[in-house]
Structures are given as structure tokens and as C-alpha cells.
Amino acid sequence: MSVTGTATYSGMTGEFEPSAHLDTFARDNLPPRDQWPLLTFDLPGLRYPLRMNCATELLDRHVENGRGEHPALISPTETLSYRELAQRVNRIANVLVNDLGMVPGNRVMLRSANNPWMVAAYFAVLKAGGVVVATMPLLRAKELGQMLAKARITHALCDARLADEMHKAAAEAPALEKIVFWGNGELESLCAAQSDEFAPCDTAADDVCLLGFTSGSTGEPKATMHFHRDMMAICDAYGMQVLKPLPTDRFIGSPPLAFTFGLGGLVFFPFRVGATGILLERAGPDDLLPAIEKYKATVTFTAPTAYRAMAAKAAQFDLSSLRRCVSAGETLPAPTFELWEKTTGIRLMDGIGATEMLHIFVGAPQEKVKPGATGIPVPGYEAMVVDADCNEVPRGTPGRLAVRGPTGCRYLADPRQANYVQKGWNITGDTYIQDEDGYFIYQARNDDMIVAAGYNIAGPEVEVALLTHPSVKECGVVGSPDPERGMVVKAYIVLKDGFAGDVVLIKELQDHVKATIAPYKYPRAIEFVTDLPRTESGKLQRFALRKMAAG
């Protein structure tokens, strides 16, 4: 990278800036530097000063620049301007420091659905120099306990409605010093006694500010470590270069703020330009549609399954305010893309991200969307398809997706770092093809490839074929053990109303797949179900289907 002048930017030298953290646990437990991916800062907008607090950049700057009265957050219960949100953030930060004894570098667990108090608590921890550990509302004490132990979390701010599991987890977490709840008046009372002014912690741009736990299906959870500069980088790469938000935009969506997909899409991306985030505690398809109409949302973030469900009822609502619709979390089937465009006139913007990378790193701007393809590398990132030795494979050849850019995988004290980062590249665990135009086309998760009688079959490709049949509402395809073929393709299908799941329909669906894609890929086994296992954000849990198939 060439840089003119004498300025030094965070990340350029490879050396750490002196930390503001008094509690050095996070920096002490970063992986060895030689196990990091190569970080690149070729895009001028990604060059940040050595010292920076992302809360100041994303929130306080708008108050200072005269946009303090513009709505920052809208929810069914309250609307907060940037000034009002900043004041709440400052009061919570004062509570953390003055009442709870938090020092820079302490880890703070946050527990809540998507609402303004959750966002205020998030920014308060960042501003005070703490490290956020945000958690999904549906997690139970066992899962919380794993996080509390691995990250040695010292403080927690929690919605009172989630108190039971929080208390159970806390009983087994000796490092946890203080828990404060909101919604029952506790945090609110403490805030009322504090000043609405707070001087931001003088954090280094490479101070850890977020531990994002992965939603792995088995084993010990992995905690990904992200810096203040990383939070800005996703805004200035995907946000500014691909999504291209306007200050007048209103963002809405389904992913929890504990997922970095939701954090970026509902808070950070709008805040980077002084726009508005709309927060819904319940955000299923039947909740999103009336909310889009009511709040005149312009940008949505949700999963392909939700778009497909919303398309069926879209005619009942005024969705004319929408101008951008982002799809991520699972593969976007071409039939869903086509259905949403036919219904709304809007082309879905597909994308792939990862907790390890913080947000989307492959995805095309709306004017460059190519149906059936995830997209092209987000400006600031590089991507290629590689073999087992990290050598790039020819275009059109399936292989492992490798990516690098201004963000990258850093696991907290975890030997699995060596699996994710190889030869300076982040190996995402996805099988892709890159076509002659440079677009990346998703095949499957590496562990979702089905090897049947020597053939490699991508489950999502079979799903796409099934979804084009008029009887199929949803489906999930995995490999099922078979003594003769090793594995066979098995489809779990949710039917639309009015269709009967019988042997006649099974034969019809199998013939339909044979006529749509290579015949050897057809599902030899089909099971009709009433619903599919999904994460809180709507992502299909194929590991659960694999477990069912194995049983």
C-alpha cells in the first residue's frame, strides 16, 4: 500500500498502539501475530487515526455537527434523537464507571431483544472503553455460562425480562462482579442520578471493543475479537461502497443486534451517515410487513426465507418506501430473488459475511447484482477460490472461499485460529465457484457437500430446484447415511397449503428435480415436515437436519 505524506494510520505498521485498557485480558489473549490474516487497507477510506473511539465517530459526531435532533432510533415504545440517545449513552457510561467500577478493558455482557436500551448500553460500553459481549435473548444459562467463563466477563447489563437465565448463569461465574437490569427501574434509577455528559475513553484504534461469539452447532464456542477500527471499516467498506445509504434512510430488519449482521444493518450503517434505525423486538415476516408500511422503512436486512414469506403477502401492504433490500445469513435461491423482484420491483442484494470478518465481504451494489451469484468482493477486500493448499483454482472450478481485507479472524485464545486463517487468508468454510465475470457463486458450506456414490452434490442447489415446484414452501437438503452409496440426498420439505405429502407428490418432486438439474442430484429420500429448524435470525440449521437424517 502506498500512502503519501507523513501520516500514520492504524494497522499500517503491524505494531500495536499503546492500549487504553487497564484490564489487559483481551489484548493478552489475541492469537499470535503470525497466525493473523493479512490485513489490507488499500481503500483510502479505511485508513484510521491511531487513536479512535468508534462510539464517538458513530454517535457524538452527529450531535456536534448539528444533526442532534434527527431521529436515531425508532421503536414501538419510544423514539430517540441522536442527542437523546447520546445523553442516555453518557448516563449509562457513568453508571458503568461510577457505580459498577468498570475499567477500560473489562468485558460487559449485554442481554436484550432489539430495542433502544440495548443500543444505548452497547454504545455506553464502547464509549467507556469496555469490551461488548452481546448475546441473543433465546440463549440459556448453559450457553451464557460458556461465554462468561471463556471471556471472563466482569459486568452484565440485562433486560429484566431475561433475568432468570442470567441469574442461573451468574451463579456459576465467579468473575462476574455486577449485574444491573433495566425494565424494572434499576438501571433507569441509576441513570437518573448520573450526568448526561461523559468524556470518551481514549482508546487505541486497535483496542478490542467486541467479542462476537460464533453460533457454532457443537463444542466450545469461539469468540471473535474486533477492534474499534474494525467497527468503522465495515461501515466504510460494505456500508458506504455497496449499500450507499443516505441520511434520510430508515433501516429495518430481523437479525438480533447480538449478530454482527444485525449490528451493522440496523445500527452502525445508518449511524455512519446520520440515518435512522427502526428496532422491533419481534421481527418475523408478519411483523416486518406492517412495520415497513408504518415507519416508511427504506432499507431492509433479513434472511431469504423471510423475503419469500413476505412476498406472499406483500400486496396487502404499502412497501413503496423501500429502496434497498439486503439478504444474508443463508444462500439466496434464484426463485426467491425472482419472486421478490416480481412482487416489489426491487432486486435483492445478496451477500456473505461471517462473525470472524464482522460483516459482509462479498456482495454487489444494487446496479451490479447478478441473479444466482452472491456478488463480487466488497471494495477493500480480496477474495478467491482455492484448493486444499490455498492455491487459486481455475474459474468455474469449485473450491474453498478465501478472503482478506481490513477485518479478519482473531479468535480469543483458541487453537482453531489455525484452521480459519491459512497463509494469510481467511478460509470461511464455504464452497464457491468464481465465474468468468468475477462473480462468486455459492455451492454449499464445506461440510454441507453431499458425497453420494462418488458424486459431489451441493445441498443448496437441490433446495433451489425444489423451491421452483409449486407445492414447496420451504425445504432443507442434507446427506443421509446409506450403506450402499455412502450417503444419499435427503430433502425435508414444508408444503404450501392445499398439498398432500404422499408418495405421488414424492415421485413428482423427484422427477421435477431430475428435469431441473443433473438427475443424479435428485433427493432419493423426502420427508414432509411442518417446519424446519432455524436460528433466531431465521437461518436454516442444517446441522440439526443432518442429526435428524443420521438418526
Image (cartoon, rainbow, N blue to C red):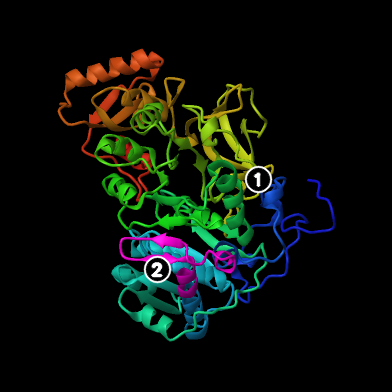
Q: Is residue 318 left or right of residue 461?
A: left
Does residue 152 appear in the picture of this structure? no
In the picture shown, does residue 173 fall above or below 275? below
Question: Which of the pair 384/263 is nearer the observer?
Answer: 263
Residue displayed at 40% across by 50% down: 252
Task: Work out which quarter of the rendered image holds the C terminus and state it.
Answer: top left
Q: Is residue 270 left or right of residue 318?
A: right
Give the amino acid type for the residue marked by disc 1 in the picture.
Gly
Secondary structure beneath dot 2 equals helix
The Cα atoms of the two marked residues, 1 and 2, are separated by 32 Å
In the picture shown, does residue 369 fall above or below 19? above
Mark count: 2
Q: Quadrant of residue 523?
A: top left
Residue displayed at 65% across by 33% down: 389
Residue displayed at 37% across by 79% down: 188
**Residue hosting label 1:** 405
Question: Which of the pair 382/415 is nearer the observer?
Answer: 382
Query: Label 2: few (<14), some or many (≥20) within 10 Å?
Result: many
Q: Quadrant of residue 325?
A: top left
Magenta-highlighted residues: 61-88
- Give x and y (percent) for residue 543: 38, 41
**Residue hosting label 2:** 117
Give the amino acid type for the residue marked by disc 2 in the picture.
Trp
Does residue 248 appear in the picture of this structure? yes
